[in-house]
Image (tube, helix red, strand yellow):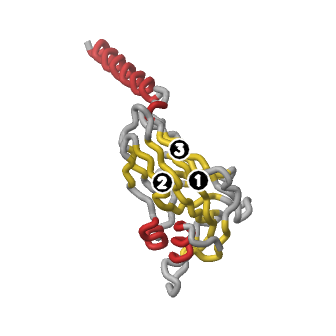
């Protein structure tokens, strides 16, 4: 009796596991795909949250901070769902690694220019909603390197709302800033000047 019960439990667990594996292998729903266009504005290793601040914050060893302008979020597929852009979901990818970290003081650096928890309704397109700051691994790359963004955690299946992030056409250079300051980064985000 015990053997029969154990066999039945094992069969149920195997069937449940198979269902989970098959469900995670479903192809992404292209009719609900969200498209995000971005531009890389600046790279910097250190920042201050105010010009007269006594402390300077530095990126982790072998990493830099990268300022990105989110140019457009398009959520217009025939099966679009409400999409929420969260600053933690984009990740940087270089030949040296994948990073998901943001600058701890990004809300102080970017102020109202920081884009986070932005809802984009089905059928809606948001143009120039703001900027984000991410860390990138570049210990063997030049400081002025372009760093690509991808959406979602590594290994996270696209599921019912896949996201594609692409660099805007013509985005082939980036500014290098000695120390990121709120006024400099907010001006870059607003397109007021380039250092």
Q: What is the tally of numbered marks visible in this picture? A: 3
Q: Secondary structure at mark 1?
A: strand
Query: Could you say where residue 73 lies in the image, as x and y percent from the top left?
Result: 48, 48
Q: Is residue 166 left or right of residue 131?
A: right
Residue at x 49% of width, y 27% of height = 27
Residues 25 and 71: in front is 71
| Vertical arrangement, residue 2 with respect to residue 169, above or below | above
Q: CA distance from mark 2 to mark 1?
A: 22 Å
Residue at x 43% of width, y 37% of height = 161
| Vertical arrangement, residue 24 with respect to residue 143, above or below | above
Residue at x 49% of width, y 81% of height = 50
N-terminal of the pair, mark 2 or mark 1, is 1
Query: Could you say where residue 174 lies in the image, as x and y percent from the top left?
Result: 67, 63
Give the image quarter of residue 41: bottom right
Query: Could you say where residue 106 lies in the image, as x and y percent from the top left?
Result: 47, 68
Is the N terminus in the top left, top right, bottom left or bottom right quadrant? Answer: top left
State the mark number for residue 127.
Answer: 2
Query: Could you say where residue 6 lies in the image, as x and y percent from the top left?
Result: 31, 18
Residues 126 and 145: in front is 126
User: Mark 1 — residue?
Assistant: 92
Residues 113 and 20: in front is 113
Q: Is residue 55 left or right of residue 124?
A: right
State the mark number for residue 102.
Answer: none
User: Mark 3 — residue?
Assistant: 154
N-terminal of the pair, mark 2 or mark 3, is 2
Q: CA distance from mark 2 to mark 3?
A: 27 Å
| Vertical arrangement, residue 176 with respect to residue 167, above or below | below
Q: Secondary structure at mark 2?
A: strand
Residues 164 and 89: in front is 164
Q: Secondary structure at mark 3?
A: loop
| Vertical arrangement, residue 184 with respect to residue 75, above or below | below
Q: Is residue 25 left or right of residue 61?
A: left
């Amino acid at each position: 009796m015990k053997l029969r019960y154990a066999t039945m439990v094992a069969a149920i667990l195997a069937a449940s596991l198979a269902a989970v594996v098959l469900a995670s292998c479903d192809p992404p729903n292209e009719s609900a795909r969200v498209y995000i266009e971005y531009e890389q504005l600046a790279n910097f290793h250190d920042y201050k949250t105010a010009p007269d601040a006594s402390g300077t914050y530095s990126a982790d060893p072998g990493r830099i901070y990268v300022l990105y302008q989110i140019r457009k979020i398009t959520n217009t597929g025939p099966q679009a769902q409400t999409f929420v852009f969260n600053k933690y979901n984009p990740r940087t990818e270089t030949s040296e690694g994948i990073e998901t970290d943001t600058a701890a003081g990004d809300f102080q650096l970017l102020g109202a220019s920081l884009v986070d928890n932005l809802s984009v309704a089905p059928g809606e397109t948001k143009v120039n909603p703001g900027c984000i700051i991410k860390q990138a691994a570049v210990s063997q790359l030049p400081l002025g390197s372009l760093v690509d963004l991808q959406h979602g955690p590594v290994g996270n299946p696209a599921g019912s709302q896949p996201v594609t992030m692409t660099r805007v056409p013509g985005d082939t250079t980036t500014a290098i800033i000695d120390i990121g300051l709120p006024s400099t980064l907010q001006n870059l985000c607003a397109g007021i000047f380039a250092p």
